[in-house]
Image: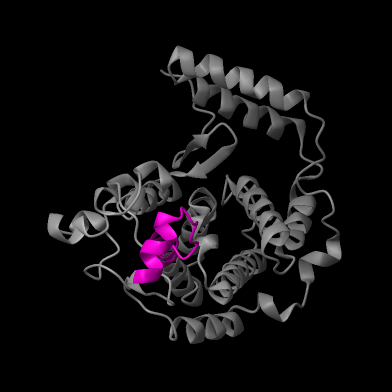
Amino acid sequence: MPPKSAIPAGYTFLDVETFISKKAYEMVEGLLKQAANRNPDAFDMYIYNGLHFTNAFYFICLSRSTFVIADFYSYAILDLIDKTLTAAHSKITKKDYDEGYYILEALTIFIDRESEWLMCDDDERVEVTNKVYAAAVITLMRALDKDGRLDVIHFPALECFLKGVARWCGEMKDNVGGSDYDLVCKAIGRRLFKDKPEGDVAIETARVEEWINGLKATEQAELRREMKAMQKEAKKPWYAGGKSHYEHSSNPDFVLSRMWKEYKQHLATVPKKPLRGPGNWDITKWTAAQRKTFEFAGLPGDEDDY
């Protein structure tokens, strides 16, 4: 009889630091694949998607190697984020909290890995997207806590999820501002994980080892070197600074119904389709003729300029 796996059924690792449900893992893979199909760089193309546009402006920017932040890709990623947030909102409002959790677990990884969406020229859209994401996460955490299910028994990767949300919030505050939803996650993390039993720590270590042992020998060696380097770095617990009263913050930005209304009001004012090209974010659906206008080969200057 094979030894019992330390990794619970329905869970895996995305990388050595990211323990994740398989449902979220599959969602992340799907989102990343869709993102790749929307990336003009992958097709040797450049597509400006800003609202203030003229053909002269387009070619002047490219010929001068000017970096234009209103990029097609930023908006293409935002479109995926919008759809994923809508799915999460639907699950949460219907009290299907398990599915809502998996969706937000995946989205937390996706918004970080495909962070080009922060570079669009609609600052208000970036801000309100971050706010509604935060409100969804905190509303979900509070609902699960009320149900007595905010724990690793029901959600084995909960600590990794909360840590990921807190880290992302910290980056957002450093770059674009935003509310302190990291402090809420840290407060929850401190309450749940500060006095973690040694047995739980041993199980977590065994999970990582089991996952690494399933990789190729060269990958194992590289990961072990990375882990050794990480262990040498003196770090505070990820939940440091999460004082207990933060968990019950009455910040109105954490009210999902309020933030959803603000979010939808802003989305109603922005285009739903690309402003250039055939009106489909997925470039694999474009014909060769439709792509040609935006290919580097047809633009002034050298490809290296872009």
- Figure disc tally: 0
Nearer-the-camera pick, 45 or 279: 45
Q: Is residue 150 above or below residue 274?
A: above
Residue 288 pos. (x, y %)? 14, 54
Q: Quadrant of residue 281?
A: bottom left
Residue 268 pos. (x, y %)? 43, 85
* Residue at figure coordinates x 69%, y 20% from the top left: 228
Q: Give the extent of the magenta segment.
A: 56-80
How is this picture coloured? one colour
**Left or right: 155, with 193 as reference point:** left
Nearer-the-camera pick, 137 or 191: 137
Q: Is residue 78 above or below residue 209?
A: below
**Left or right: 159, with 46 as reference point:** right
Residue 88 pos. (x, y %)? 47, 67
Q: Quadrant of residue 260?
A: bottom right
Instruction: Indicate yes or no whether the magenta region holds residue 64.
Output: yes
Residue 305 pos. (x, y %)? 42, 46
* Residue at figure coordinates x 58%, y 45% from the top left: 157
Q: Quadrant of residue 245?
A: bottom right
**Left or right: 197, with 119 as reference point:** right
Nearer-the-camera pick, 34 or 246: 34
* Residue at figure coordinates x 68%, y 54% from the top left: 171
Instruction: Indicate yes or no whether the magenta region holds residue 175.
Output: no
Magenta residues: mostly which secondary structure? Answer: helix
Q: Is residue 219 above or below residue 124?
A: above
Whether residue 108 is visible here, answered yes or no, is yes
Whether residue 48 is visible here, answered yes or no, is no
* Residue at figure coordinates x 43%, y 16% from the top left: 216
Q: Identify the image quadrant of the N terminus.
A: top left
